[in-house]
Image (tube, rainbow, N blue to C red):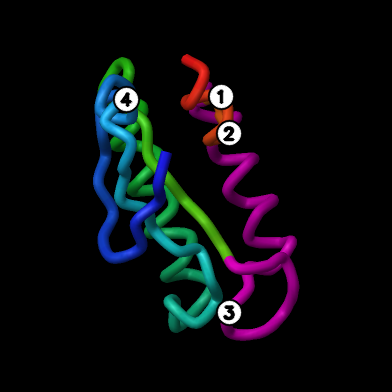
Amino acid sequence: VVRGAYELQVNNKHALRGGFVESRSLDNINYESEEQYEEYVTQILTQLKEGKGNVVSLYSHAIADGGWCVTPERLVFLFEKARELGLEFYTFQYWQNW
């Protein structure tokens, strides 16, 4: 699966069989504040919860402080919110073999 990096799209999991999926960066540089990041992540995950079989592709360049990275704290927020909503995580490798 090739990951795009221009806009976020919530897709039905079958769309991944096409070999390309748009993704959303979690990099710190894309969010002006912690509140903006948390609001955005909550919105995405809530949207996923509402649609059975939907997936979204998220990425970051690294896990660290700095612009082109996502902080460990932001990842923890993402994982905890996803768990709270009963969502699952998958790797691209999983989708290639699905």
Earlier in the chain: of badge 1 and badge 4, it is 4
Asked if disc 3 and disc 4 are in contact, CB closer than 8 Å, the reply is no
Earlier in the chain: of badge 2 and badge 3, it is 3
Which label sits in the foreground, 2 or 3? 2
- The N terminus - image quarter: top left
The residue tagged 1 is: 94
Cα separation, mark 2 vs mark 3, equals: 21 Å
Cα separation, mark 3 vs mark 4, equals: 29 Å
The residue tagged 2 is: 91
The residue tagged 3 is: 68
Q: Name the secondary structure under disc 2.
A: loop
Cα separation, mark 2 vs mark 1, equals: 5 Å
Identify the residue shown where x is 55% and y is 76%.
28
Stretch in magenta:
61-87
Earlier in the chain: of badge 3 and badge 1, it is 3
Earlier in the chain: of badge 2 and badge 4, it is 4
